[in-house]
């Protein structure tokens, strides 16, 4: 699952290659979900992660250690005991998230909440991943500001007044 966690971190940084790799891997791997109640048959009841706008997100984890840290932070328990988890196809988890969205229960999904690699997914992005199309996610992430420490140049942008650039000739 480390490969998937790395792909999520690359995708979160807006790397087009990372986003494409995440979409491809998502169709090949299992992820883990935090159970709010013990697993009975095929009924899966999961904890939901708090969202910024009031509606929660369905949490999806690429690594059990990240799940344990997040569960401890939020105080998640399975039926009053320690947190239990279930391993599920990553594709199935996105279908579950869409069902939560359509029922009005959740705003979307979040991969690895509480971790530096956390990546929230809106419904159109979930549908894109299911269709093996990273474009909706690429479009949103490309509009996010690039943090100062991740920029490729120092000083003002060449398009800003006072900006300069050198010709390669």
Image (spheres, rainbow, N blue to C red):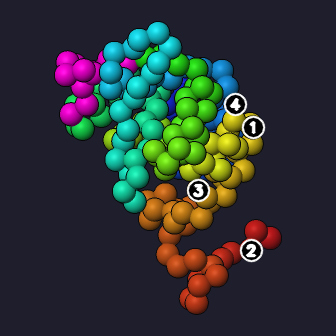
Mark 4 or 1, nearer chain start: 4
Q: Earlier in the sequence, mark 4 or mark 2?
A: 4
Secondary structure beneath dot 1 equals loop
What predominant SS class does the magenta segment belong to? loop
> CA gap, disc 3 to disc 1?
18 Å
Of the two numbered discs 4 and 3 on the same chain, state the one appearing first in sequence.
4
Q: CA distance from mark 4 to mark 1?
A: 10 Å
Residue that mark 3 sits on = 141
Camera-nearest label, 2 or 1: 1
Residue 120 visible (yes or no): no
Position in image of residue 6 (x %, y %): 51, 32
Q: Which residue is mark 2?
A: 167
Q: Answer whether residue 126 is magenta in the image.
A: no
Residue 58 vertical placement versus 89 (above, below): below
Rounded to the nearest angstrom, the CA distance separating label 4 from label 3 is: 18 Å
Residue tagged 4: 24
Q: Which mark is residue 131?
A: 1
- Across and down, in percent, residue 3 comes to 54, 25
| Residue positioned most to the right | 169
Q: Does the stretch in magenta take in 82?
A: yes
Residue drawn at x 40%, y 47% as measured from the top left: 56
At x 35%, y 33%, the residue is 47
Residue 152: percent from the left, percent from the top? Answer: 56, 61
**Magenta span covers which residues?**
75-85
Q: Earlier in the sequence, mark 3 or mark 1?
A: 1
Front: mark 3 or 2: 3
């Amino acid at each position: 699952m480390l490969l998937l966690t790395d792909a999520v971190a690359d995708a979160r940084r807006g790397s087009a290659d990372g986003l494409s790799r995440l979409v491809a891997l998502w169709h090949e791997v299992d992820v883990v979900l935090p159970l709010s109640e013990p697993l009975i048959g095929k009924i899966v009841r999961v904890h939901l992660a708090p969202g910024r706008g009031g509606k929660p997100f369905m949490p999806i984890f690429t690594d059990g250690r990240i799940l344990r840290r997040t569960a401890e932070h939020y105080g998640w328990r399975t039926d009053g005991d320690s947190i239990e988890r279930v391993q599920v196809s990553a594709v199935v988890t996105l279908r579950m998230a869409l069902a939560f969205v359509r029922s009005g229960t959740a705003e979307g999904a979040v991969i690895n909440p509480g971790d530096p690699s956390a990546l929230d997914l809106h419904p159109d992005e979930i549908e894109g991943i299911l269709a093996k199309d990273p474009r909706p996610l690429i479009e949103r992430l490309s509009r996010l500001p690039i943090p100062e420490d991740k920029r490729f140049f120092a000083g003002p942008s060449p398009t800003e007044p006072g900006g300069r650039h050198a010709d390669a000739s």
